[in-house]
Image (cartoon, rainbow, N blue to C red):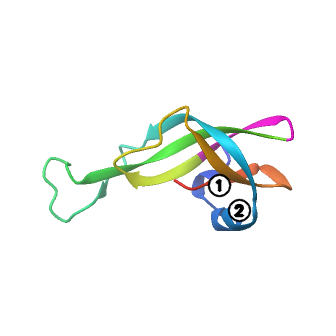
Amino acid sequence: MRMKNLLGLGREKLLSSGTETTGTIEKVKVQYWLKVKDSPVNINNSAATYPAIVTVRYRVDGKDYTAQLWCSARRFYPPEGLQIPLWYDPQQPEHCAAKF
């Protein structure tokens, strides 16, 4: 796992100046241990959301890459198999970013 991708380091730079490609979501792992409350009054976790780690697969110059990206807390997550735009660093294609 590349911590730079997972933590989103350099994400904004990649989104603004990286090279675009298409990636496929392979796995979405919701992080239930990290609850984010949507409101100060929370009854039965109804107002809680959870972040996720999203595994994406993409290809650059004929080589396949896999990355794990952080998806902020939300109620709905992108489904597995969905194709999404990704931006990567042409000098280090293993570094990528996505907009979730």
Say above or below: 74 vs 1: below
Tag 2 near tag 1, CB within 8 Å = yes
Q: Residues within 10 Å of mark 2 (few under 14, many from 20)?
A: many
From which residue to which does the magenta span run? 61-68
The location of residue 46, given as percent across then percent down, is 19, 49
**Badge 2 is on which residue?**
14
Q: CA distance from mark 2 to mark 1?
A: 6 Å
Residue linked to disc 1: 97
Element under disc 2: helix
In which quadrant is the N terminus drawn? top right
Report whether 96 appears left or right of 80.
right
Q: Amino acid at mark 2?
A: Leu
Residue 25, percent from left and from top: 58, 37
Residue drawn at x 60%, y 45% is: 84
Q: Amino acid at mark 1?
A: Ala
Q: Is 66 within the magenta?
A: yes
